[in-house]
Amino acid sequence: MSRITGVTQQPRNLQSGGMLATLLAMLPVLVLAAWSQAVAAQALPDFTGLVKENADAVVNISTTTMPEASNTRGMPFDERQLQQMPEFFQDFFHGPRSPFGGGAPGRAQPRRSMGSGFIVSEDGYILTNNHVVEGADEIIVRLNDRRELPATLVGTDPRSDMAVLKIENAEDLPVVKIGQSSDLEVGEWVFAIGSPFGFDYTVTSGIVSALGRSLPSENYVPFIQTDVAINPGNSGGPLFNMDGEVVGINSQIYTRSGGFMGVSFAIPIDDAMNVFRQLRDKGSVSRGWLGVLIQEVNRDLAESFGLERPRGALIAEVMPDSPAQESGLQAGDIVLSYDGEPIELSSDLPPMVGRTPVGEMAKLKVLRGGEVIELGVEIGQLPEEGGQQAAAPSVDGGSPSSAPLGMVVEPLPADAADSLGIDSGVVVTNVARGAAYEAGIRPGDVITEINRKKVDSVEGFREVVRDLPDGKAVSVRVVRQGRALYLVMKP
């Protein structure tokens, strides 16, 4: 029995020894895993201290717009969003409710809106968005210590969606630290403090998703894109880096639902502080102006202009009496660099020009006729918005079946040329399926240039077309509804 016991005990001892050996072999792996988890936990940012240091300088901004000066501009939420909020928020925006439902009958209620902002100086200057305070008759600033102070509007800049406020007779005002948005890198941690949906001092965090974003409505602001949760009420609030410095002003979101969808945009603080100083010192903002209409250089345009790859800003039109015209810039030029800074996308150019002081000389590197040349231009002041241009005449007629490139052209009437601000060209009156149609040319377009050769008459048009290379992409400059653009055609 003892022998059997001895026999039966031996495998157990071997099994225990094997388990011990296995555990010893796995020990480095387990230690490494635990160490990795600890390192990963340490790598995640802790915003606790940063929030405590900076929250006091962030303010809530509430505005009131009286009925006669209001339409719906002050309402930051639509009815569907309001219905999802607590009743006291609905009352705040709608006004006191009648016991029979709805607001007070017989008269319109004042419109109220909310937003965020932050204090940038001890004497009470505050930065926020223009759309937070636009049209407001009363602006109240609420601090973290629950002080409520009236604010005056120093100035606004709708082009950058910025506003500067001032509160008076306030002591011991906390102030944010201003950083440099030019030092930001994609992937860097950032966080926001604001009042989404009226909930004061809400903190959200994320990373920088992209830099230098150009939005259709804001050509002069190279936005910072982040995935920080921004919602209505966050507008005008600060975006901080991990040093507790403000690097942007939260301004816009991309949304299909009215709420946050992972894409938000902030005004870079470098640009914001430039606007702030101008509004504070003189009440208005001056921006540099070149006086050109530009478009993106795609692959086909790059090929037609002899570029190895798409880059630069293609000048589609030079404004009359503009700095660009005086410097010798021409339609068809591709701006490759501005004051030594490369232009990769056409959207890179407007912010660079806008930041240039009025009257300063800028150096441009331009591709013209296959050669790179350098031009100097004295930057002018961006005119006020509102200028209009005449539309190109719209005409039809003729048969394109046997016409060059499948389109019929006619001489450009002198009065039409004057209204468009051009000296020559031909009017497209009909287009059949073919190279011209595939390029996007349509009746009513005015063709002024093909393959970088000027078109000044119907006969000149035919001569240029006869010399076009077969199967190679060529550029066509057209004026459509008063705006010039380049199309690419493959004969």
Image (cartoon, rainbow, N blue to C red):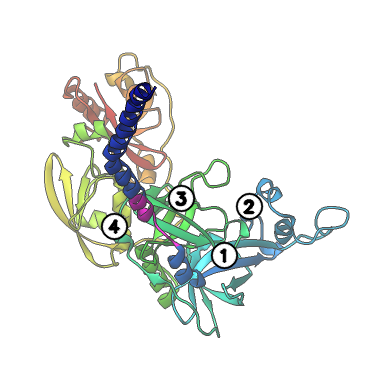
Quarter of the figure with residue 470: top left
> Farthest right residue?
100
Give the residue type that dot 2 points to.
Phe
Along the line of sight, the residue nearer the viewer: 235 or 375: 235
**Magenta segment, prevailing SS (helix, strand or loop):** helix
Residue 283 is left or right of residue 143, and the answer is: left
Along the line of sight, the residue nearer the viewer: 491 or 326: 491
Quarter of the figure with residue 302: top left
Q: Which residue is mark 4?
A: 352
User: What segment is highlighted magenta in the picture?
Assistant: 38-47
Quarter of the figure with residue 71: bottom right
Q: Which residue is mark 2?
A: 77
**How many neighbours does mark 4 have within 10 angstroms: few (below 14), some (14-19), or many (20 or more)?**
some
**How many neighbours does mark 2 have within 10 angstroms: few (below 14), some (14-19), or many (20 or more)?**
some
Q: Which residue is mark 1?
A: 133
Give the residue type that dot 4 points to.
Met
Q: Is residue 285 magenta?
A: no
Q: Which residue is mark 3?
A: 264
Along the line of sight, the residue nearer the viewer: 350 or 221: 221
Measured as percent of width and height from the top left, residue 180 is found at 32, 65
Q: CA distance from mark 4 to mark 2?
A: 34 Å
Q: CA distance from mark 2 to mark 3?
A: 17 Å
Q: Quadrant of the N terminus?
A: top left
Of marks 1 and 4, which one's residue comes earlier in the chain? 1
The kind of secondary structure element at disc 3 is strand
Residues under numbered marks 4 and 2 in contact, where contact means CB atoms less than 8 Å apart: no
Residue 486 in sight: no
Image: 295 above or below 329 = above
